[in-house]
Amino acid sequence: MRFEEALADRSSWSTAGRCPIEQTMKVVGSRNAMLIMREAFYGTTRYEDFMNRVGMSSATAASNLKALTAADLLERRPYQEEGERVRQEYVLTDAGSDLMPVIIGLFEWGSKHGQRRSGVESVHVGCGEPAEVEVRCRAGHLLSSEDVELRVRTADRETR
Amino acid sequence: MRFEEALADRSSWSTAGRCPIEQTMKVVGSRNAMLIMREAFYGTTRYEDFMNRVGMSSATAASNLKALTAADLLERRPYQEEGERVRQEYVLTDAGSDLMPVIIGLFEWGSKHGQRRSGVESVHVGCGEPAEVEVRCRAGHLLSSEDVELRVRTADRETR
DNA sequence: CAGGATCCCTAAGGATACTG
DNA sequence: CAGTATCCTTAGGGATCCTG
């Protein structure tokens, strides 16, 4: 991964909270926030399940779910089973689903390089083959880290 | 993404720090650690450059570089320019390079959903097309979040 | 230049108790 | 069940000063 000359001066974007990576970390950069997203991908929707499966306190679950809802990664949705009162569930939004490559990427890295083995792998439900994260360009080329560089957008450039 | 029945009981792996995602977050789960890795991908190798480009204090730079070196994501390597004294540089290890999909994934999410636009995009240096993160199985199928499930490894199963 | 040492502040998070 | 409220501990990180 490299910079173009035009990007030699990072100060205009990479600091002051403009770096996209930093913005993402701001939202899901804590252990519990990320593990809540993991659970959401696993299909967990209820407060108590998030709390127990992530292994976090009630207060922490509440504040994280609230923050992730505010950031539009989760959507709070009322539901009612028959004979029961109305409850709330938390389901992934589109923005939340877009985080899947990151989740799988973290999972893959930890599986390969983490100290403690989990014995769990992520697989394609259709064919049973292990899932992997790849970086490709839109032309379809598989990229390694040296193939990627950062460039100021020129086509649909921002006004500011 | 779904669980198999065999994984209904998460307690044996997803808690107590065995979850691969959690293990990864333990290493690069803070803003500064992740941004240091970003810089390492950008080609930054020197202490002072990490410090200035990430926007962190000297002490924070030192402790994070030490931790990332201990975790084998960066390698400390002495070098010497002619006429200068010996200095240290920090370069990516293979394990560090394996984090690239995560970095690009975070970049992509922030670019799409972050509040503040950066005007920067990551592209394939070869053809100029934007880089994207994809999840595929080894058979080559492109996967969305519903296509992925977790399964206890059976082929090369762990001893414990 | 490349850190180490010290002090302080803030945010994340656990524990416990309480409520609609 | 789905949270709130309160209190406390710890880790991340900034600022400042010091050293080989």
Image: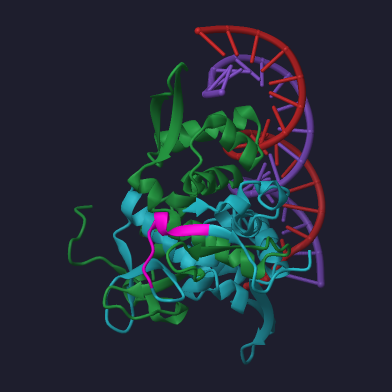
Chain colours: A cyan, B green, C purple, D red
A80 lies above or below B97: below
**What residue lies at 66% left-to-right and 39% top-to-bottom?**
B55
Residue B156 placement, left or right of A110? left
> Quick check: is A144 in the magenta stretch?
yes
Residue A135: horizontal and vertical position, in percent?
A: 42, 66
Q: What stretch is highlighted in magenta?
A: A141-149
Residue D18: horizontal and vertical position, in percent?
A: 65, 8
- The residue lying furthest to the bottom in this view is A82
**What residue lies at 66% left-to-right and 31% top-to-bottom?**
B57
Residue A93 placement, left or right of B79? right
Q: What is the quadrant of the N terminus of chain B in the image? A: bottom left
Say which quarter of the image contains residue D2.
bottom right
Q: Is residue B35 visible?
A: yes
Q: How many labels does the image show?
A: 0
**What residue lies at 45% left-to-right and 31% top-to-bottom?**
B89
Residue A68: horizontal and vertical position, in percent?
A: 66, 66
Residue A110: horizontal and vertical position, in percent?
A: 38, 54
Q: Can residue B19 be seen in this view?
A: no
> Quick check: is B51 in the magenta stretch?
no
Residue A11 or residue A24, whichever sits in front:
A11
B67 lies above or below A99: above
Residue A120 or residue B7, whichever sits in front:
A120
Say which quarter of the image contains residue A29.
bottom right
